[in-house]
Image (tube, helix red, strand yellow):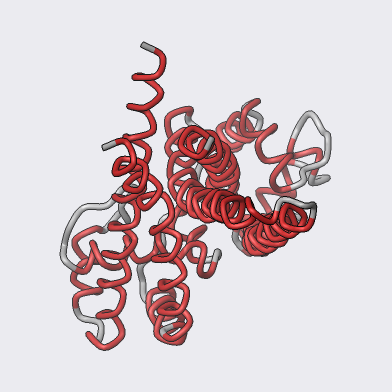
Amino acid sequence: MLNQLKELVNKPLLKSLARYVVKFRQYESMKRALNLSSRSIVHEWSTVGLGGIPGYSWYVGNAAKAAHFLKSGGYIGVGFSFLGTTNEVANACKIGREGDCSKIAFKKYAKFTSSTFAGMAGGTLGASAGMGVCVAVGIVTAGAGGVACAAVGSLVGGTVASSASDYFMDLWLK
Amino acid sequence: MIIILFYVAIGCAVVPFFITVLQFFIFSINKEKYKSLLSIYHNSKFELPPLYRFYASMGFLGSFGMSYFFSRLRKGKKIIFQPKDHGDVCDFLAGINISLMKWIDNYYHLSIFSLFLYAVFIFMSLMKVIITQI
């Protein structure tokens, strides 16, 4: 069982994915990263369950923090995007192009609304796509691993959808 | 004709955002019900699949995924990444007080409608890309 666990946690994709999202340190083995011996794992696991392994709850906590970071980051991102758009519109209206002001405002705010919706929808769909990729590749999706897969998928999905939205909107608004 | 297509495309790109704003207000009004639903589920013997655990921890940004989970399972329909004991979860959700669940159906339908509109915009944009390249 321990060997299976070792194989599972040392898969290259899971290691690199988890390091970025859950802030794993750069160690070759997750066992070493947690400063655990095989004996201590088996002892702690059999007596107090998975949560009793020293360091495990810290990493699970980081996965929860990653989700919290994404949530806060999402709201902050929308806020900054709205402020940036408003700033661009205000600048365009100030510099002697008052005639184009309403046209520019329409274009900029249309792009903002489309990109914001695309980012949210892309994030939601990207999370399930990320989970699908993890399942297909064979990465364990139980516990923190699953949250990491969904978080990475959500980030990638949101970013790609938002960029695609800007590209498509430029097609119509040029 | 081109002007009509322009307004349809821009409408389909912009309206989903305003539906999402409406959803934000609906979510804010029903936040306590949403939290109660989640806590009822967490306190039951069933476990949320990892994807939905992620959605549940994302607040409003994850509420679209959770409305899909609750709304479809309550009607006994299949979902992506189903819980292991699908049938039992469906029965459990069907037994939850309707006053806690009713809003989530409308919320889910709004999400689907906004996604549909945006899909129309993407389709029209792709067509435009293809036509301009020919």
Which quadrant of the rendered structure holds the N terminus of chain A? top right
Residue at 32 percent of width and 61 percent of height: B68
The number of discs equals 0
Instruction: Reply above or below: B36 against B125.
Output: below
Instruction: Reply above or below: A20 against A137.
Output: below
Q: What is the x, y in percent for residue A158? A: 55, 45
Q: What is the x, y in percent for residue B39? A: 44, 80
Residue at 72 percent of width and 57 percent of height: A93
Position of A70 compared to B110: left or right? Answer: right
Q: Nearer the viewer, residue A45 or A99?
A: A99
Instruction: Reply above or below: A137 against B116.
Output: above
Q: What is the x, y in percent for residue B50? A: 47, 54
Position of B59 compared to A55: left or right? Answer: left
Q: Is residue A118 visible?
A: yes
Q: Nearer the viewer, residue A103 or B48?
A: A103
Q: Nearer the viewer, residue B97 or A79?
A: A79
Q: What is the x, y in percent for residue B1? A: 26, 37
Q: Is residue A56 visible?
A: no
Residue A129 in which image quadrant: top left
Residue at 31 percent of width and 51 percent of height: B117
Residue B14 in which image quadrant: bottom left
Residue B93 in which image quadrant: bottom left
Which quadrant of the rendered structure holds the C terminus of chain A? top right
Residue at 48 percent of width and 35 percent of height: A168
Q: Residue furthest top?
A: B134
